Image (spheres, rainbow, N blue to C red):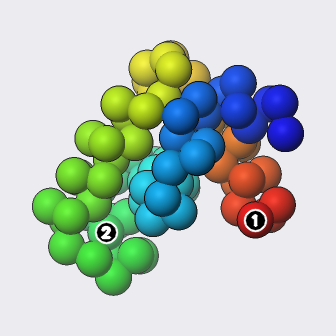
Amino acid sequence: NNFIRYILGDLARSPKELRQSLLAYIGASCNASKAADQLHTHRNTLLRRLTKARELLPRPLEENLIQVGAALELSSWLS
């Protein structure tokens, strides 16, 4: 999907755990502790995944939060 590739950039082709981590983070109102709990993972593991995911995005997450969330949600439905 062009929308997903445009919004997510290289993140669209990244390991699924990166995309799931970022989606959980956004869904938890950008609260890393809540997202880590939801994913049953350590907070530091989640933070490392989020750092990598942010590096793969073509634009800063904070400037594009809703579009990234929508693209991640759509991607999860299509995969």
Q: Position of residue 29 (x, y in %)?
A: 46, 49
- Looking at the image, which is closer to me, 7 or 61? 7
Q: In the rendered view, would you say 6 is above or below 47?
A: above
Residue at image x 27%, y 41%?
A: 51
* Image position of 75 (left or right of 39): right
Tell me if mark 2 has few (under 14), some (14-19) or many (20+) residues whose alpha carbon lies within 10 angstroms of its own.
many
Q: CA distance from mark 1 to mark 2?
A: 22 Å
Q: Which residue is labeled 1 in the image?
A: 79
Q: Position of residue 13 (x, y in %)?
A: 58, 46
Q: Quadrant of residue 41?
A: bottom left
Nearest to N terminus: mark 1 or mark 2:
2
Q: Which residue is labeled 2 in the image?
A: 36
Q: In the rendered view, would you say 36 is above or below 68?
A: below
Q: Nearer the viewer, mark 1 or mark 2?
A: 1
Q: Position of residue 14 (x, y in %)?
A: 50, 50
Task: Indicate the amino acid at tag 1.
Answer: Ser
